[in-house]
Image (spheres, rainbow, N blue to C red):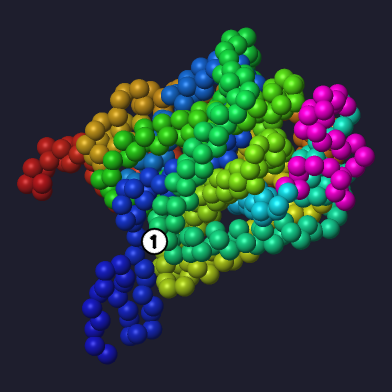
């Protein structure tokens, strides 16, 4: 058989039997990378969590702990994780294997966490898609009572306000009943899973199909999709912001959003919530940034990208607060009640408060469509990038097997079907209770991951960043990586454990003990990967215990030499250089 010419991006074949192995690939441009990361870190939490945290924790005063945590924890971790991936050119697991083998369990921890997140996050997208479909109705179904799912306690607050009638404190709004009784058909507890909600199931299938085809070809397809999915939400956010600011009562809502109250700053819980928000919003700690940055060219300016992406994330959160609270101020103005009566966070904002406010505006269908398109696109980016965050590291673990034609697509299909099959539990009548368990214990899990994240040598990473970008990071980053960031993450984690309370739903339903036990098992199933794998590597290594420890804490020999290392080598052996 004639020898075959080696094509770019493939390996040669042996006797025609061995299939070509695809090259790892890279982003086509820095813009693609920027949009992918922006789509990941700018998500639903920027719209429905940050504004509410500001309002609840001292308004504009909450920006003090938020900025402090961003500077001491968010940006340093973002830069560290980005640089690790770009320097090693490996995803989250093999990245740690090259930099600090004893800590490679952090990569496995991140993958397990993202598997949990992929199962639950897509359900929120399914809800949003269902609401988007209802938004095309001639009359929004959550705008009034009188439907088959409404109860006797349902009262149209807009109609009562129109005729100056008093709102009954025991009544419920049409939007609340539509959400709880029509969409979720929520049961009495997690023990009563009930039947599958077929409309949500179909929407979930649609979202899984969309996510699959967005990333099935790897960076080639992902890099193209984000030109739309990462930018169009900003168009929708701008439209909703302009509309919100023109509504009566908007100023009242914005004042409540940002009015400073310094008293909450003395509460440690406020600072812990700032840490949690920054960690989740910046997407640090799980290795996802390392995986995405590993597809950058070695000389990409990750130092500059870090600052711009962090600024974009923080600015989006702040602007989203104006869009949200201007509308909540309008709703409070129309009902003649305080902001506290209408302010919500999480799904309560996206699927009750905001739809209820939209129903009171002229052309409600238009604004509902804009809002839910924004929600879907914000969540869609985060969902398929999280899926990539699982697939990329697994492929890097076995590149000769999984980089063959069709293997990536098959792996992604198996993973999607597995997550979908588990997520069906969250599409039942008791599914909301299941989803909250995943969300609550997953939040604590992310804080665990950040505690040991400072293990790579600070000076080594500064040298690597300087070699890649030509700019040496400020000594402040070295200080953060060594002391401040681990201290902030550890204090937040210890504080969350000290303030741990058994999970409840709507402050009325208390979960059974066995559910909280399963939640802790879910957390430990991921977090124990770090110490268990470290002990395993120490036990199975060669040499004395001291030699094993030294070997497992050393960087791999095949990593690129930094400029400082090259200069040292040239001094020792001038002829070799």
Instruction: Name the residue beneath numbered marker 1.
Output: 220
For residue 549, above or below residue 297: above
Query: Which residue is painted at 56% across and 25% down in the image?
Result: 274
Provide the residue span drawn in magenta: 140-168
Nearer to us in this view, 358 or 558: 358
Residue 504: image quadrant is top right
State the image coordinates of residue 360 (x, y, percent, origin top left). Answer: 70, 36
User: Which one is in front, 256 or 17?
Assistant: 256
| Residue 445 among those drawn in magenta | no
Which quadrant, please, contains the N terminus? bottom left
Q: Residues within 10 Å of mark 1 (few under 14, many from 20)?
A: some
Residue at point 72%, 47% (across, down): 140
Disc 1 secondary structure class? helix
Position in image of residue 284 (x %, y %): 49, 38
Q: Is residue 244 above or below residue 529?
A: above
| Relative side of 6 to 491, left or right | left
């Amino acid at each position: 058989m004639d020898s075959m010419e080696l094509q770019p991006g493939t390996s040669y074949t042996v006797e025609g039997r061995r299939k070509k192995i695809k090259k790892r690939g890279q982003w086509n441009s820095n813009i693609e990378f920027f949009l992918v990361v922006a789509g990941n870190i700018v998500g639903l939490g920027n719209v429905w969590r940050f504004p509410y945290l500001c309002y609840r924790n001292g308004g504009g005063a909450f920006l003090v702990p938020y900025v402090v945590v961003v500077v001491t924890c968010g940006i340093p971790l973002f830069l560290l994780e980005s640089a690790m991936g770009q320097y090693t050119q490996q995803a989250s697991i093999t990245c740690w294997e090259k930099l600090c083998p004893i800590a490679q369990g952090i990569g496995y921890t991140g993958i397990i966490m993202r598997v949990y997140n992929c199962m639950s996050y897509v359900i929120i997208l399914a809800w949003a898609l269902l609401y988007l479909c209802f938004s095309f109705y001639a009359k929004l179904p959550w705008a009034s009572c009188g439907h088959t799912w409404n109860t006797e306690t349902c009262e149209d607050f807009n109609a009562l306000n129109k005729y100056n009638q008093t709102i009954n404190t025991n009544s419920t709004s049409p939007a609340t009943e539509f959400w709880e009784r029509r969409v979720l058909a929520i049961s009495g507890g997690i023990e009563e899973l009930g039947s599958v909600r077929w409309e949500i199931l179909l929407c979930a299938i649609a979202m899984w199909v969309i996510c699959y085809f967005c990333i099935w070809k790897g960076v080639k397809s992902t890099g193209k999709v984000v030109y739309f999915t990462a930018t169009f939400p900003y168009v929708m956010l701008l439209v909703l912001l302009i509309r919100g600011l023109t509504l009566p009562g908007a100023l009242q809502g914005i004042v409540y959003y940002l009015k400073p109250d310094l008293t909450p700053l003395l509460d440690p819980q406020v600072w812990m919530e700032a840490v949690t928000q920054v960690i989740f919003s910046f997407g640090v700690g799980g290795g996802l940034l390392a995986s995405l940055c590993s597809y950058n060219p070695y000389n990409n300016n990750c130092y500059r990208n870090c600052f711009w992406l962090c600024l974009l994330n923080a600015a989006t959160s702040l602007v989203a607060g104006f869009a949200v609270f201007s509308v909540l101020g309008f709703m409070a103005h129309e009902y003649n009640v305080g902001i506290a009566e209408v302010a919500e966070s999480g799904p309560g904002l996206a699927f009750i408060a905001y739809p209820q406010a939209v129903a009171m505006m002229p052309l409600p269908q238009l604004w509902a469509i804009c809002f839910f398109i924004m929600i879907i696109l914000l969540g869609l980016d985060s969902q398929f990038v999280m899926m990539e965050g699982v697939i990329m590291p697994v492929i890097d673990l076995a590149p000769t097997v999984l980089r063959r034609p069709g293997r990536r697509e098959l792996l992604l299909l198996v993973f999607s079907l597995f997550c979908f099959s588990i997520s069906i539990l969250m599409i039942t009548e008791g599914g909301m209770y299941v989803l909250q368990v995943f969300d609550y214990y997953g939040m604590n899990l992310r804080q665990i991951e950040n505690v040991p994240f400072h293990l790579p040598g600070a000076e080594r990473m500064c040298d690597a960043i300087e070699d890649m970008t030509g700019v040496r990071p400020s000594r402040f980053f070295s200080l953060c990586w060594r002391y401040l960031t681990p201290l902030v993450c550890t204090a937040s984690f210890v504080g969350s454990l000290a303030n741990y309370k058994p999970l409840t739903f709507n402050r009325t339903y208390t979960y059974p003990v066995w559910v909280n036990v399963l939640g802790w098992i879910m957390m430990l199933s991921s977090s124990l990967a770090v110490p268990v794998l470290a002990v395993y590597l120490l036990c199975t290594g060669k040499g004395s215990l001291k030699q094993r420890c030294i070997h497992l804490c050393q960087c791999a020999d095949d990593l690129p030499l930094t400029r400082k290392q090259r200069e040292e080598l040239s001094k020792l052996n001038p002829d070799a250089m």
